[in-house]
Amino acid sequence: MRIFILGVGATGSLLAHLLTRQGHIVTCGDRDVERARRFLGKKSHIPVQEVNARNLWAIVRAARGNHLLVNAGPAIFNEIILRAALRLCAHYIDLAARLTKQPFKAEQLYFHKRFEQKNRAAVITAGVSPGLMNLLAKRGAEMLDSVEAIHIRLYESSQSDDPISQWSPEESFNEATSRPRIYRAGRFHFGKRFGEREWFRFTAPIGDSPVYLAAQDEACTLPYFLKLREVDAKIGGNEIDRLRRWHRQGKLSRSRGMVSKRFPKTPTPRMVAKLIRRGVLQNARFAAAVLVRGVKNEEPRLIRWDCEFPTLYQIRLRGMFTSPIAYATAQMAALFIKHFPREMAGVYPPEALVPETRQAILADVRSRNIRITMRITRLKKNEEDEHL
């Protein structure tokens, strides 16, 4: 398949290499070609074109002749790139939502009929969180007769002397300054930024960690495709602790803008290697859990999925220099593309894919050094989640 990747940062560059290894013909586009080549590496022969993602026709000219358009750039460009895919009559995939048209519904879903008319498929929010978390939420829901609630818990930490962004600075700033979307009692609400603190027990070696409400896209797709009453997402780790501290100090707001020293540019693989050699960056860790609570055979049950991703140290041992989040997101995006549902037409988040596609992706996850474990707990009647 001929694939055009728009956005060649930490995730897009690794994804380009993974897709090339899968046998696809890959071309990339980015507004800063030199920066893109630094992410791809000196030995890379993957072609890169200068493309401004704000210009629809620039995207169309650069991506003409490709079967799939991959949006690996900031979610602010989603609608422009979706329109470009329709102009190209190409399939489409992206990694996140921006939530611009309506605060509680992913803007990509409004393109469903247009992709149906073109007989093309668009798979949206197809990374880790969102992405893998949606697949696990759906799988858990299928194992129950009815679903009451889905809770997503994430952990992100970096052992570093200086702030180092695991996400792109634009996405990190947008997430930090956005009000969390939550779904409670069958209705959407805005939550308080860094609110609803709780202690959550992640798998070893992380253990107990405080987690806080966060702006995650899963809450704005799952309620449209699963019958339930509650969805929320919370994040823990030293990165969210730092953002919470800046928020409480009044240093984090859209009116103040994005301060570069607080949201530094995503380091290239060469920069990551240099930071490790200098001892500035010692390690980084990313973990996730999905909890699906509902009823099976008239008994309350809790299905818990835990995801363990390679640490920075483990990734480095494989000869790669990228963050655990970029690694996991690129690997999952590559799996969504490997099992891309070209026979479908319309716009679909991961939980809306057909069972065969979802099962194939989950079956392949272990081959990407991502470990997933599941535990089912029978709950007492009216039992709360105190044990979480």
Image (spheres, helix red, strand yellow):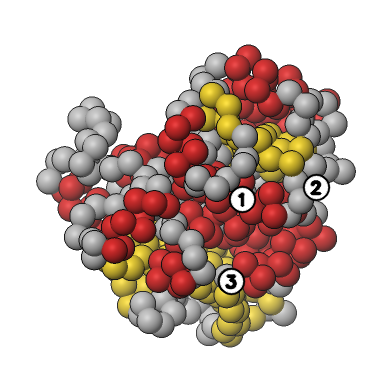
Labels 2 & 3 near each other (Cβ < 8 A)? no
- Gap in Å between the C-alphas at discs 1 and 2? 21 Å
Q: Residues within 10 Å of mark 3 (few under 14, many from 20)?
A: some
Q: Quadrant of residue 314?
A: bottom left
- Gap in Å between the C-alphas at discs 1 and 3? 17 Å
| Labels 1 and 2: the sequence-earlier one | 1
Is residue 64 in view?
yes
- Gap in Å between the C-alphas at discs 2 and 3? 24 Å
Element class at badge 1? helix
Name the side, left or right, on which 71 lies relative to 287: right
- The residue that appears at 82% across and 26% down in the rendered structure is 118
Is residue 134 in view?
no
Element class at badge 2? loop
Whole-percent x, y for residue 137 in the image:
61, 62
The residue that mark 2 highlights is: 341
The residue that mark 1 highlights is: 17
Whole-percent x, y for residue 330 in the image:
57, 53
| Labels 1 and 3: the sequence-earlier one | 1
The residue that mark 3 highlights is: 369
- The residue that appears at 62% across and 22% down in the rendered structure is 59
Q: Quadrant of residue 119?
A: top right
| Labels 2 and 3: the sequence-earlier one | 2
For residue 205, above or below residue 250:
below
- The residue that appears at 72% across and 79% down in the rendered structure is 297
Query: What amino acid does circle 2 point to?
Result: Pro
